[in-house]
Image (cartoon, helix red, strand yellow):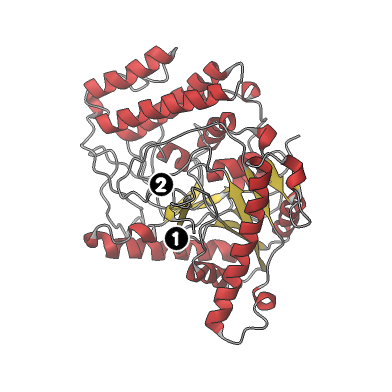
């Protein structure tokens, strides 16, 4: 069996479908267990990086910095603390205080004109005491790995793309180090003055080999769109592979159904709202912030606070589902997929029956009709997680240019799936297994198409592959 680890993201997204008075939210959960985000829709994002407004242009059209919901200048990330008055979700970190006033320049990275100036900016900020050495090392590592991956793509403008996207990333990381963004239990994606969503899509696009990427059963995604217009809730029970899952899902869907791509809301574990290199991407997604079960007991003094925070998050989710027209992406395995330690083969991690049942009951009691779809994603080659679960924040990030895929199967009915079971507990297990088996079947088709290089010939009567961006 594949092993799982603390999930990088439990994704949820807010976007507004072309409906009136309705909302669309997509969740991505890996632990026990957003909302319509009414903003002006962004222009459809083309797949060619060279034709997309650069990340630098986005930066220069925004203000010098963003205003977090709460902020603290005493540390890179605030110390964990429960605040029932304003319901802020504060996260912990072990970095030393950042001396904001000692910063060489508030726009050190934005002003860089080439790779040398960009990397020199990292070192200058470390020397000034405004950038911790461990964060600086992570920034350089990501820069080099990202550059190698984009160059691997063969794009003639690879160097320009790398410089543009890395200027944006390092600038956002540094801004957050000097003025930490604090996530509330329900976080709405920041789209202005700097569009963090577009920034995230610009970053992932050069890493995905679209010629060798596929979507399984696109008509079912369109079916979901119709149900959302009718006020129904959609639940996607999925496996989870990388920190980049949300951006990859959005990338593969944005051409045909852009509002669903942008509407994704993710239930985020504390890893991606704590890690300085993850936070800028998380800021660009609508989130329900939770503490992962796998890290619940790391610090005994914080157990009660974490449980209370998760209870608040569940209440937020219940409120969203009651409003209808929500699409929720959940990874009930409790973490990212891991390769088998003996064979090295990747497969979806087993689903946690209680997580599946908790979400099912939330949907059934929300009021609007709900539908549960099994969804598979294959993208671990692009940004694989560490082989083992790590407690410390700041995992090593390996980055590659590779094909990816997602696939969805028809919705499963709990009553129909468990009709022959008279034992309630067995019925829960049966439903969870049916979802997991469908995800695994779809995953194997994607694996055959991408890793087995069979392409469209890997399609089966159950999974019809296409490339909707063409």
Residue 466 picture location, percent across and down: 75, 43
Residue at image mark 2: 387
- Element marked by disc 2: loop
**x 76%, y 53%: residue:** 460
Q: Is residue 235 above or below residue 207?
A: below
Query: At 42% from the left edge and 24% from the top edge, which residue is drawn?
Result: 144
**First-in-chain label (2 vs 1):** 1
Q: Residue at x 75, y 56 (%)?
A: 223
Instruction: Using residue 128 as the reference point, say whether residue 293 is left or right of it.
Output: right
Of badges 2 and 1, the one in the foreground is: 2
* Residue bearing the label numbered 1: 31
Q: Label 1: state its secondary structure.
A: loop
Relative vertical location of residue 300 with respect to residue 247 in this rendering, above or below: below
Query: For residue 385, which quarter of the picture?
Result: top left
Closest to the observer, 4 or 375: 4
Q: Is residue 426 left or right of residue 109?
A: right
State the image coordinates of residue 99 (x, y, percent, origin top left): 22, 29
Near-viewer residue (354 or 201): 354
Q: Residues within 10 Å of mark 1 (few under 14, many from 20)?
A: many
Is residue 267 shown above or below 181? below
As drawn, 269 above or below 75? below
Res 48 label: none
Q: Nearer the viewer, residue 89 or 173?
A: 173
Q: CA distance from mark 2 to mark 1?
A: 19 Å
Res. 238 image quadrant: bottom right
Is 166 left, or right, of 138 in this rendering?
A: right
């Amino acid at each position: 069996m594949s092993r799982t680890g603390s999930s990088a993201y439990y994704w949820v997204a807010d976007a507004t479908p072309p409906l009136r008075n309705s909302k669309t939210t997509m969740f991505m959960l890996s632990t026990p267990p957003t909302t319509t985000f009414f903003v002006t829709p962004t222009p459809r994002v083309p797949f060619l990086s060279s034709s997309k407004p650069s990340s630098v242009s986005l930066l220069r059209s925004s203000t010098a910095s963003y205003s977090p919901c709460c902020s603290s200048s005493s540390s890179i990330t605030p110390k964990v603390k429960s605040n029932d008055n304003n319901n802020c979700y504060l996260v912990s970190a072990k970095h030393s205080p950042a001396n904001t006033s000692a910063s060489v320049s508030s726009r050190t990275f934005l002003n860089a004109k080439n790779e040398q100036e960009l990397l020199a900016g990292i070192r200058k900020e470390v020397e000034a005491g405004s950038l911790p050495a461990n964060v600086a090392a992570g920034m350089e590592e990501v820069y080099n790995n990202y550059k190698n991956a984009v160059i691997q793509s063969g794009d003639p403008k690879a160097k320009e793309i790398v410089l543009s996207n890395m200027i944006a990333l390092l600038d956002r990381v540094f801004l957050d180090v000097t003025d930490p963004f604090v996530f509330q239990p329900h976080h709405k994606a920041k789209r202005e003055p700097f569009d963090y969503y577009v920034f995230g899509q610009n970053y992932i696009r050069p890493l995905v080999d679209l010629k060798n990427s596929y979507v399984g059963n696109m008509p079912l995604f369109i079916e979901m769109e119709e149900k959302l217009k009718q006020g129904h809730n959609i639940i996607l029970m999925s496996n989870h592979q990388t920190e980049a899952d949300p951006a990859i899902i959005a990338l593969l869907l944005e051409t045909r159904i852009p509002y669903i791509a942008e509407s994704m809301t993710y239930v985020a574990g504390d890893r991606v709202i704590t890690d300085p290199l993850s936070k800028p991407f998380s800021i660009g997604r609508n989130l329900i912030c939770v503490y992962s079960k796998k890290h619940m007991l790391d610090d005994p003094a914080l157990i009660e606070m974490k449980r209370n925070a998760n209870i608040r998050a569940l209440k937020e989710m219940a409120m969203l589902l009651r409003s209808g027209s929500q699409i929720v992406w959940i990874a009930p395995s409790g973490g990212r997929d891991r390769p088998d330690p003996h064979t090295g083969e990747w497969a979806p991690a087993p689903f946690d029956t209680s997580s599946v049942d908790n979400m099912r009951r939330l949907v059934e009691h929300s009021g609007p009709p709900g539908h549960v779809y099994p969804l598979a994603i294959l993208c671990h080659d692009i940004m694989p997680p560490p082989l083992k679960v790590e407690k410390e924040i700041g995992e090593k990030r390996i980055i590659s240019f590779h094909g990816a895929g997602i696939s969805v199967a028809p919705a499963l009915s709990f009553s129909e799936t468990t009709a022959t079971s008279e034992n309630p507990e067995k019925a829960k297990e049966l439903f969870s297994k049916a979802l997991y088996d469908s995800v695994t079947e779809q995953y194997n088709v994607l694996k055959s198409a991408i890793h087995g290089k069979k392409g469209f010939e890997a399609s089966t009567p159950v999974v019809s592959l296409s490339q909707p961006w063409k």
